[in-house]
Image (spheres, coloured by chain):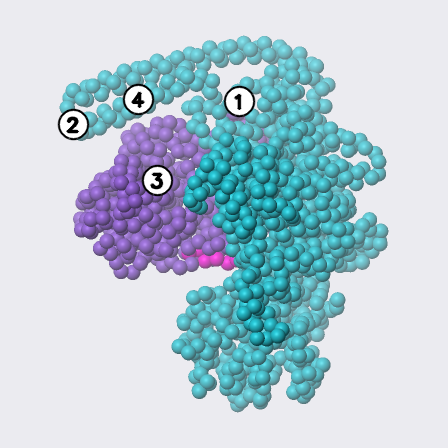
Amino acid sequence: MKYLRMRSTPWVMGIGFLALVLSTHSNAFANDPIPSLDVRFKTQPDGSVETTEVPDFQRHISPMLGRLGCNGRACHGSFQGQGGFMLSLFGYDFDVDHKALLDEKSPRVDLKSPLESLILTKPVDAELHDGGQRFKKNGWEYAVLRKWIEAGALKKPKGNSAEQKLTSLDVTPLEVSFDAAGKTQALRAIAVWEDGSQEDVTTLCRFFSSDTSIATIDENGIITGGERGDTHVVVAYDNAVVPVSVLRPSGPSGELKVQIANAKSDVDKFVLTKLDKLGIKPSELASDAEYCRRVSLDIAGTLPTASQVRNFLDDESPDKRSKFVESLLNSPGYAALWATFLCDITGNNDEQLRNFSYLGDSQSQHWYQWIYDRVSRNVPYDQIVEGIVTAVSREPGESYRDYCEAMTKIANDKTGKSFAERSHMMYYWARNNQKKAEERAISFAYAFCGVRIQCAQCHKHPFDQWSKKDFEQFERLFDGIQANQAKLLPDASPEFAKMIADLGISKSTKANQLSKEIKDKFKSGKYDKTIPFPEVFVESRTVTNKGIAADKKKKQPEPKKAPAARLLGGDFVDLSVVADPRQALMEWLRRKDNPYFAKAIVNRVWAHYFQAGIVNPPDDLNLANAPSNVELLDYLANGFIEHQYDLKWLHRTITNSETYQRSWQTNASNEMDRRNFSHALLRRLPAETAYDALRIALSSDKAALSICNLESERAMTLPGASVQSKKSNNKDLYALSVFGRSIRESNCDCDRTSDPSLLQTVFIRNDADVLRAMIDPKSSWLAQVAKEHDWALPNNVDKGMDKVAKPLPATMKDVNSDKDRVLADELDKKVRIFRTQLEKFTEGKAPDAKIRDAKSRLLLNEKRLAEQLALIAKKAEEKASAVNLEAANASKIDTNIAAIASDKMPSLIEEAYMRTLSRKPSSMESQRSQQAIAQAESPIQGFSDLLWVLINSKEFILNH
Amino acid sequence: MSNHKYCDGIKRRDFIRIGGITSGCLTLANYLQLAEAGQVKEGHATSGIFIDLNGGPSHIDTFDPKPDAPDGIRGDFKTIPTNVSGIQISEHLPKMAQTLDKYVIVRGVSHTLAAHRLGSEYVNTGSRPLASLEYPGYGAVVCKERAVENDIPPFVAIPSGGQRSGFLGIQYAPMNTAASPQQGRPFNVRGISLGAGVTVEQLDRRQNLLKDLDTKFASMEGQDQLLTGLDRFSDKAFSMLSSERARIAFDISKESPSFAAPFGPDPFEQSCLLAVRLIESGVRFVSLSVGGWDNHTDIFNNLSKKLLPKLDGGVSALLNGLEQKGLLSSTSVMVTGEFGRTPKINTRATLGGRDHYPRCMFMLMAGGKIRGGQVVGESDATGAGPANDAIKPDDVAASFYHNLGIDHKQEFQTETGRPITLVREGNIIPQLFA
């Protein structure tokens, strides 16, 4: 890459250079590019233009309209147009735009009197044109448009019917470094066309800066340096998008030479090399305790137990970190976390599967288990994807009945695990929100390529390469995939009818009613008869074959053209010879030169570990969103492919690197860095990890271990996405939705959020689930401690709070005297009713008898209420004195315990720290904790305060 | 956090997205901005209530009666005069008839989405639903635009509803009460009041200990937005939990009996009472939803016995209650279903009903600068469509936002950076304010 630092004014050099080539510009095939339009069409002072050149619609007119902003969203690019003139949004739909300009009803181009053309008269006149003045009458833009119109306003140059193909857009320089703010650098862009012609198109390009605080770029391609850091500016012309790297180093480079030479891994080498360029020094390595916590949460989504931390800290072998990584990669938490991760990107959403099979929620369970099984066996990533992408419901050679019987057997396995034995995961194609080819195209590009092609569904994105045509051709690959109840393979119908008859359902039952009746038959959840299953398959394209057969006259019939189907940015696929285009898609994904497949997953996994992708956001691999470290991304992607898509290789490579092991603590040179991985970034635990971590932290040693080992259900094993899921209990889901678990709905990594919120804070501080889990007599650590020391557990847990928003007893502190309270409430209610009634009667001048009656009732109930309240008060008093007595007794015990515990106290405090923050407390922390516990009413109360504080600390909820 | 790209080719830095750190409705960014700028437009409503009549209520049998229409269309109900001369509504809405001076009936609202979910999304957002994008509901937008004080939730949905946060992100989603309040009973929402035997003293003690011990990242304080955000939420949670305000706001049993009396015992009517109470306590937006309006069969019994009495009692008491507390002029109120119902009464069952009909429906608007006591828009003689120009849900939405001083043409960014005009197609309906 060229590394230029511009000192002279760009225009002096630019114009000198252009003058040189002007004389030869008639030769379009010369090696030197022809100069830019503004030079060729320069208007002389007398208003004339010297050139006889005819501008070209695709090369000149269309990009110029784009650059002038005509086809913007707020202007004529709006889907309703503007002032009766509508262009394709952001251009590149040449047919549409040309047609719009020459539209018969309201032409913008007047071929008879070109100077009257609206496209000339409007933009020069701020009065006439709502969009203001776009160019001047003596400007080159005017001259270009005028010459084009005068020559007939053709869409394509004469004798050239094909769309012209841009070979490349050569931008110089490709890397810019500024040593101070305010310095500038001009870019130059040369279009190289398929016919070999080259043209300076700098004045026709669009430019933007990815981060305007670091570099700005104006419409002439002049970059100006800003704050320290690095970013890209992007140059776009025709369908080319070229990123230019802009650096504003924080300090001198070359200081990391030794570190680079001694780098422990290639990952480190590439990261350090980039940091060196930016004059950034990386942070030190994190401590053992921090590393232990971080890597366990990151690889396995699991908070390490106190004993795990202790073992790790006590281990003195030099390779203990990599040994720990191995043990984590083999833990069930690893499989659960990464199965969840793959469920996120493939969109495992139970809501969306409602109308597929008759199994309801267990389809999501199947989806999850199918992936979990493969992740835990470390099946290569490409094979996992193949089982999803090319999924059909039947195994090879399976009849419809075989298939249904196999699925019925699976349905009876409530864990859903036996579905993992099927070779395909068909549900991916069966989602309600993925029925149309276009939806499938978008979600495929999102999930497996990390590419967003949504924009191209309606228009070419100005800074992305995909055109509407690209989208349409890609979309064709997803035609004909069948996944619904109404459509089975032809051989299935008789068997289907038999199964329905066996179930005692009338064969005339249709659609929704049929579905309902089948579901009703298995209401019990026991599948004792064969369930008819819907199928996933690709419909064969008989239409095309007919087309060929009909054309008998020709000896070698030219195959009737199937709609052009094309891999994203790749080859065309002949749909007339391909039975299942998804095979072609899979082959394409696997091709070594596939620009997306490996990069997308590698980058997403990296983003998981570093909070920022090498390409960020990680689900937006497009030319304009350039990687912060090209070499690093290439290294990981290529290595991943060379290692046969071995996911564990990827995790190992990342987590063993020093780059991953760096501390969150920054130095003066790297504190601003958030994209070059010079230090760890603080990040909130993902929803499932956070919820499980809370439970592990609060549970007894035994219970915590069983959560870690997935022996008891945990958030990370919840299969579907919906909040209403019936399978799992409500309370988990409330917390998970508050913490932003992925909703798996919109083909965006942003379906998951790691932003903190007030409700999260409130949840950990005050939710009954958390408070109860903290002192649960059976499973909490505090109960374990209390038992070990013969302490009493606080018994004032409100057991009624686990249901959302259950109306609370009137007095929170008095929840035990429910019956008395209920009676009082009832009386209170009556009093209100009678009081209101009485008011009404009095106002409404009701008969005296009625008023009297109401009055007496009111009095009666008021009296009873007073009595009841007195009773409650008395009981409460009695109870309080009993409690006091108890407390008096307890305090005796407490004194004893305090004596015993004075030496145990520090170790218990250490235990509390280890099980929450995965480290030992400092002496200050230990002392402050002891002091707090000593001041509490009882040791257990004191420890519950401490535990509460620890789980509510930033250190707990942030991975660091 | 990342840079995002916009379709207009501009790529702006993260200053727009620092709102990523959020609480309920209140983003850190807009909290700080508002705290500094004190920006709230004068003379507009500052809070909102949205009442969602799920299922699509019949317009002809409620607020747009057609007494002169032929049999088979007219329906069973008679009409009654209201407290505004010349305006008649269904006989089963007597209290609403006596409150008409406080609200506007918008008639002849028209759209084309006859499915519940789509129609509902349309009227809850004011924009025709797109497959690729979910628009935010009114409440989410209002909360994004207007901060609230620390110890109260910004947006409450009773018990839940169609007001989703859409592309604005889950942080603007309402706090669902999940349950409906019951008459005279205390009521509360999960996590909002100090539970499980924890006392304020204990919380105070814990918070102090937390301040002393949570110092790991002290060296980074002020530099990292995440840390700043978490600290802020910690303070806010503490003030919410230790103050009684939020809890008391939800506790309708604390309302004076004479004020509560007009709200009948039905959970919907009690929800209306709660809504008023919440608005009074400083909650920015309340959405209510009440279902049962999908009356394909037996429509007249359903309406006259079940649905209309509670609608009549609840909404009239809500409007009167707001006025009584001096809140009507600062609260923008909207009542709507997802569509109207067919003028023709179907005869599929013995007791007929009406089917989905988006071409003609009604909405109610009140509060703020809305001039009550009028009908805006008109349907044709049989309620089959707008008589003149159709009013689109978009227009009503634009007016609703206008009433709140929010520019409906304002542009927001989706999570993926796509720029979206708040209400694409709507125009403010001037008559509402005239």
In the displayed structure, A61 sits above or below A721; it is below
Q: Name the residue under label 3.
A: B292
Crowdedness of circle 3 by 10 Å Cα count: few (<14), some, many (20+)? some
Q: Kindly identify which residue carries mark 1.
A: A797
For the residues marked 3 and 4, what is the alpha-carbon distance in whole angstroms? 30 Å
Query: Which residue range is magenta in the image?
Result: B414-423
Whether B177 is among the magenta residues is no
Query: Residue A511 at x, y = what percent?
Result: 44, 46
| Distance Cα–Cα, label 4 vs label 2 | 22 Å
- Give the chain of mark 1: A
> From mark 1 to mark 2, how far is it between C-alphas?
51 Å
**Mark seen at residue A419:** none
Q: Mark 3, chain letter?
A: B
Q: How far apart are marks 4 and 1 (CA)?
A: 30 Å
The colour assigned to chain A within the rendered structure: cyan
Could you tell me which secondary element the residue under label 4 belongs to? helix
Q: Which of marks 3 and 1 is in front?
A: 3
* Label 2 Cα neighbours within 10 Å, binned few <14 / some 14-19 / many ≥20: few
Which element is circle 1 on? loop
- Dot 3 falls on a residue whose secondary structure is loop
Q: Disc 3 and disc 1: Cα gap in Å?
A: 38 Å
Disc 4 residue crowd, few under 14, some 14–19, many 20+, Cα 10 Å: some
Classified by dominant secondary structure, the portion drawn in magenta counts as loop
| Cβ atoms at labels 1 and 2 below 8 Å apart | no
The residue that mark 4 highlights is: A830
Q: Which of marks 2 and 3 is in front?
A: 3
| Amino acid at dot 2 | Lys
Q: Tag 4: residue type?
A: Lys
